[in-house]
Amino acid sequence: MEILATIRIALRAILRNKLRSLLTVLGVVIGVCAVITMVNMGSGAQLSIEKAISGLGTNLLIIFPGSMTKGGMRAGFGSVTTLTDQDAQAIREECPGVQLVTPVVSTAAQVVYQNQNWGTSILGTDPDFQLIKNWPLEKGEFFTAQDVKAAAKVCVIGKTVVEKLFGGQNPVGHIIRVKRVPFRVRGVLTEKGQTSFGQDQDDTVVVPYTTAQKRLVGITYLSMVMASAVSMDRMSDAQAQIGDLLRQRHHIQKGTDDDFTVRNLADLTATFTIITGILTLLLGSIASISLVVGGIGIMNIMLVSVTERTREIGIRMAVGAKPADILMQFLLEAVLLSLIGGGVGILIGIILTATIEYITGWTTPVSFFAIVVSFLFSAGVGIFFGLYPARKASRMNPIEALRYE
Amino acid sequence: MKQFIFADQLYKTYRLDGNAEVHALRGVSLQVGKGEFVAIMGPSGSGKSTFMNLLGCLDTPTRGRLFLEQVEISSLTPIQLAEIRNKKIGFVFQNFNLLPRTSALENVELPLLYSRASATQRRERSREALARVGLQERMHNLSNQLSGGEQQRVAIARALVNNPSIILADEPTGNLDTQTSGEIMSILGDLNTISGITIILVTHEFDIARYAKRQVHFRDGKIISDQ
């Protein structure tokens, strides 16, 4: 029998019992819809994490001092005092893969403005900081290299600090006190929001690192050095160059542990990509279980349908339908049911994804791959669960089928 | 007369659930020539329906041989049997056996669907067949909107549409009143005399059997008279 006529017969059979077909298809609709939504949400989460990480800075490399072994005890990061301003200088001058370098001294302190006070993190850096972190100012201006050289008592502050100390006021030009040292506010950083680890990046006071060293902490070394690579694909080059340079400068013998660590945010991104990838797969496979359940629903209804239409099968056989014709007819009906379910499920899945995108503010790209796979999968479900009822129909004895009431 | 149907010592034994055996046919031999109109008569349980099922390629005999146009159909596969049902045999049943909620035209098209005729061919030949039974006006009506006589005429058109060499009519008038029965029988009679189609008619009514030129009586799985 020609395929077009078979499809017409199958469609008519489906439309004949509209409510029943609708309920049958619902299982597949929910299954496919769940798969699509889960996969899209997974890739949405992945994107938003990538965005958050790249928001930490572009092509960022962070050099931590630390992990020095002392008598078998390995202290954590920051426990050593070996990373210095000169190291930062040398990295800037001698590593061709590195574009920008900024020394960082970090501490935490109580900051006071008039009768308001607020505990926040203090970041001592230099003007390159805002380039490396990709962090423009909202108001005022950044402190200058001159300020750094002179260890001037100036600062730029994050939005959260502005809110806590100044309320609605413009803080530029005012004096805040950090550990009793007065700092003039030069500018306000734009709002950057939370890191993907839940840390508020706007809750900070940025001062010249020299000032932080001398006035606030009383040290001569650095908490860390931030550097940016010339480009994304030269990250590992830059990383290696920094490593070589610092080993040489710190006189580290071959075979002993480095007293510093170079962290590369690309690694972090890769880790998160793997984690979200696993999550997506997990969610997708849980969702696909509902697709299988939907398939069982189709099988159930097809079995009922075959029994109900025994007479019809008998008539068709009497006028010359071969077992293969009957098989095709019922199989196609099951496949059409599941494909209709798949199509509707894809549509609802896309709508649901858009809704979630709207609510969460994530960018959730609609995965073409997920659509194709779930469509093929629902076709597969139709074939798999339609085969048994269709075989049952095709193996009927025509005489008994004709007599069936 | 050319041997058109040739049954040679046909036996059919059914096994019931309780393992009891039912001997529906016990050695039936019959020859029918091309263009004959034969009525098969007998009480229920005489084996006439079983014999019709064998003739109609719906079933195969337990023992014995059956030839249709020199082809031994008693040893064919289900697929080959389906093909013969499609091309050579037209069925007319007591309860019409039309597809419900399907138009008359589409019911008639059904055999052509399985012989891979093109859509236009299907339409054309089905219209023709419906015209032959005088139903061209009602071809778009659904089968369940038609009267019993009309439904049986649709069934005859369906039997005709693939130009079969034989029509098997199993109690075709069993569900119809006398007048409609007469109409149906005269249609069958015309098909026999004008178109030369061999017709085998199963009935237990003598009035209906009169339309046939030859009557074969069955009893207890055997032929008891043939005249």
Image (cartoon, rainbow, N blue to C red):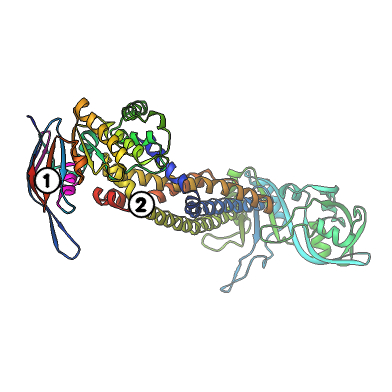
Per the model, the C-alpha gap separating discs 2 and 1 is 38 Å
Q: Is B111 on the left or on the right of A282, as rendered? A: left
Q: Is A1 on the left or on the right of A352, as rendered? A: left
Q: Nearer the viewer, residue A111 or B199?
A: B199
Q: Which mark is residue B98?
A: none
Q: What's the residue type where badge 2 is placed?
A: Val
Residue at 24% in and 33% down: B188
Residue A232 in percent (x, y) is at 61, 44
Residue at 23% in and 33% down: B87
**Number of numbered discs overlaid on the protein picture:** 2
Q: Is residue B31 visible?
A: yes
Q: Nearer the viewer, residue B50 or A191?
A: B50
Q: What's the residue type where badge 1 is placed?
A: His
Q: Is B156 on the left or on the right of A113, as rendered? A: left
Residue A157 in percent (x, y) is at 83, 56
Residue pointed to by mark 2: A306
Callout 2: chain: A
Q: Nearer the viewer, residue A216 or B152?
A: B152
Q: Is residue B21 above or below residue A5?
A: below
Which is closer to the viewer, label 2 or label 1? 1
Q: Which mark is residue B217?
A: 1
Q: Secondary structure at mark 1?
A: strand
Callout 1: chain: B
Magenta range is B46-69
Instruction: Please tell me how crowded label 1 is: few (under 14), some (14-19), or many (20+) other residues with Cα within 10 Å.
Output: some
Instruction: Please tell me how crowded label 2 is: few (under 14), some (14-19), or many (20+) other residues with Cα within 10 Å.
Output: some
Residue A398: say if magenta. Answer: no
Rendered-image quadrant of the N terminus of chain A: top left
Q: Secondary structure at mark 2?
A: helix
Residue A272 in percent (x, y) is at 57, 56
Q: Nearer the viewer, residue A154 or A283?
A: A283
Residue B14 in percent (x, y) is at 15, 56
